[in-house]
Image (cartoon, grey):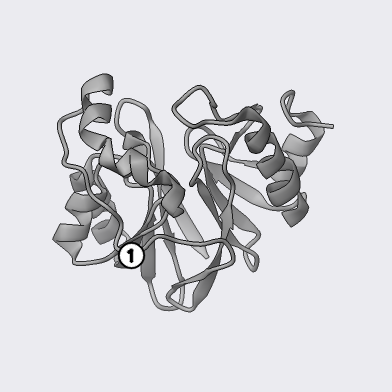
Amino acid sequence: MEFQILPVTGFQQNCTLLWCPRTRRAAIVDPGGEPDRIEALLNQLELEPERILLTHGHLDHVGAGAELARRLTIPIEGPHPDDAFLFQALPEQCRMFGFPPIDAFEPDRWLQPGERIAVGEETLEVIHCPGHTPGHIVFHDPESKLAQVGDVLFRGSIGRTDFPRGNHRQLLDSIRHRLFPLGDEVRFIPGHGPMSTFGEERRSNPFVGE
């Protein structure tokens, strides 16, 4: 699996293009905004988008999802259905954070833990990691030892749990019992900021490190 990160919106949220190098088929993960820039990068890289994947329902991760799905005629998949309340509240999220208004929408398909998502000839595993939001999921490619973790874990930090239905204990359990066991060598793309590895965070992260 190959990837390129494109930070979007004033929140510098890491929209990620994941693609199969053999077929050039791609998934757009967490298109939080700026659909023109995302579409331009797809064209520049000569990728064929097959689906949009969402880790959770916060505005800065889903804001351009419906528009890109319409333009590219591709489905939106994820997150877990426990985040449905966040999609219903998207107009209110826009007002709260000063984003241009978007309508509430729902993904074409909610995802469940253990599901596998095809990206060309590559496969992503779906891992439910609640805490930042109740329906947050992580996409893991075991072959490439790569994970897209949204706002669960960051380099040197962890996701916030002071938003509606956040849960600090659940977040710590998700990191320690669902992500770290995937292996120290796994690189991860967070929802914001630079990449790291699970091993580095296990050793040194002040919130969940040993």
Label 1 environment density (alpha carbons within 10 Å; few <14, some 14–19, many ≥20)? many
Q: Quadrant of the C terminus?
A: top right
Query: Left or right of 136: which side holds 64?
Result: left
Give amino acid for label 1. Arg
Instruction: Between residue 29 and residue 22, name the one nearer to us.
Output: 29
* Residue 156 against residue 64 in the figure, above or below: above
Residue drawn at the location 15% of the way across and 59% of the way down: 70
Q: What is the tally of numbered marks visible in this picture?
A: 1
- Residue 7 in view: no
Residue drawn at the location 51% of the way across and 41% of the way down: 134
Q: Position of residue 35 (x, y in %)?
A: 21, 46
Instruction: Between residue 47 and residue 79, name the one nearer to us.
Output: 79
Query: Left or right of 180: which side holds 106?
Result: left
- The answer to which quarter of the image holds residue 197 is top right
Q: Position of residue 114 (x, y in %)?
A: 59, 66
Q: Position of residue 67 (x, y in %)?
A: 17, 51
Query: Left or right of 202: which side holds 16?
Result: left
Residue drawn at the location 23% of the way across and 28% of the way down: 92
Residue drawn at the location 53% of the way across and 68% of the way down: 115
* Residue 179 against residue 101 in the figure, above or below: below
- Residue 195 in view: yes
Q: Position of residue 29 (x, y in %)?
A: 40, 52
Q: Residue furthest right?
A: 210
Secondary structure found at label 1: strand
- Which residue position is annotated with label 1? 51
